[in-house]
């Protein structure tokens, strides 16, 4: 074999070796890309599954509340109404003054219970969140607290006609309620500021108070709770940021529209 043939053989061998290395590199790169795409697809499927679960949970909760409200109104309410009529009849027919006073007291208690049950039934079956705008819903919450004169709430909204789906409205209303309750209960605040706006296809809710602050890890509420709200917000692709110190508490919510 001549010198030229040896050189050609070495060159060909090196070319095949380089092509082999390049092939391995391309294969590894394609494998990583496919693996990344697969992971992204799994993550997307997981997020979609979480959203479907949340939507189902909200629907079940709404149906359950409507069912309880109807039961209170149709069953317990009717029985209490009948009991109230009986006591009124007894009070009318009875001639003994002391017994009559006792019966009237019982009737008053029943009527008071009836009124409270009606309010509870109305709150459970009311579709206010579905039928009202987010501005009206939050403004109503602020008005209720301001009427109690426990503390002052300033509510600002850059667009009073913001249109949001039921899920987003429900989350924002519940978060606002929880924040107000926790601020009044724990922070000894005098002022709560709420600001709602729509920015770059996102709805932004900012809440703050001037209280002494509280340990956000120990927030307890009779409702769903802010920790659960944080999970729900993140499941909807939003952000939930809370800061609390001795100068007050701030909560910033951003949800994609």
Image (spheres, grey):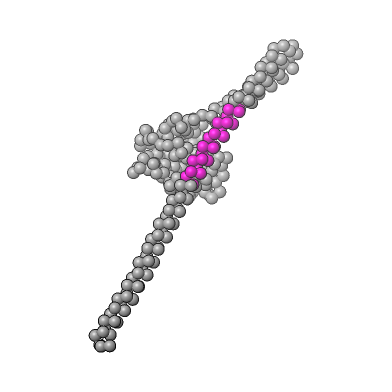
Residue visible at 43% across and 53% down?
Answer: 41
Image location of residue 193, percent across then percent down: 43, 39
Query: Magenta span has 65?
Result: yes
Rendered location of residue 133, percent (x, y): 42, 32
Residue 53 falls within the magenta-colored stretch? yes
Q: Residue at x 68, y 20 (%)?
A: 83
Q: In the picture provided, is 206 more to the left or to the right than 74?
A: left
Q: Quadrant of residue 63?
A: top right
Is 103 left, or right, of 181 in this rendering?
A: right
Q: Which quarter of the rendering shows the N terminus?
A: bottom left
Magenta span: 50-72
Q: In the picture shown, does residue 38 fall above or below 77? A: below
Give the farthest residue toward the front. Answer: 1
Residues 76 and 179: in front is: 76
Residue ID at (52%, 49%): 216
Q: Quadrant of residue 28?
A: bottom left
Percent of width and height locating residue 68: 59, 31
Work out whether 139 lies above or below 256: above
């Amino acid at each position: 074999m001549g010198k030229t043939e040896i050189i050609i053989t070495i060159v060909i061998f090196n070319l095949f070796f380089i092509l082999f290395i390049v092939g391995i590199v391309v294969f590894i790169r394609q494998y990583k890309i496919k693996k990344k795409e697969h992971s992204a697809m799994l993550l997307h499927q997981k997020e979609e599954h979480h959203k479907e679960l949340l939507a189902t949970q909200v629907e079940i909760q709404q149906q359950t509340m409507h069912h309880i409200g109807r039961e209170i109104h149709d069953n317990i309410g009717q029985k209490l109404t009948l009991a109230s009529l009986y006591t009124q009849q007894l009070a009318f027919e009875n001639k003994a003054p002391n017994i009559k006073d006792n019966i009237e007291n019982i009737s008053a208690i029943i009527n008071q219970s009836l009124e409270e049950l009606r309010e509870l039934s109305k709150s459970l079956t009311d579709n206010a969140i579905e039928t009202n705008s987010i501005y009206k819903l939050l403004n109503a919450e602020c008005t209720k607290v301001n009427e109690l004169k426990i503390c002052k709430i300033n509510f600002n909204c850059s667009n009073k006609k913001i249109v949001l789906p039921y899920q987003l409205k429900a989350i924002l209303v519940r978060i606002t309620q929880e924040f107000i309750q926790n601020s009044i209960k724990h922070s000894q605040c005098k002022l709560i500021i709420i600001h709602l706006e729509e920015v770059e296809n996102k709805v932004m809710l900012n809440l703050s108070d001037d209280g002494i602050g509280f340990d956000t890890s120990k927030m307890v509420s009779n409702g769903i709770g802010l920790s659960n709200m944080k999970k729900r917000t993140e499941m909807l692709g939003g952000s939930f940021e809370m800061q609390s110190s001795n100068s007050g508490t701030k909560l910033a919510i951003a949800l994609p529209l």
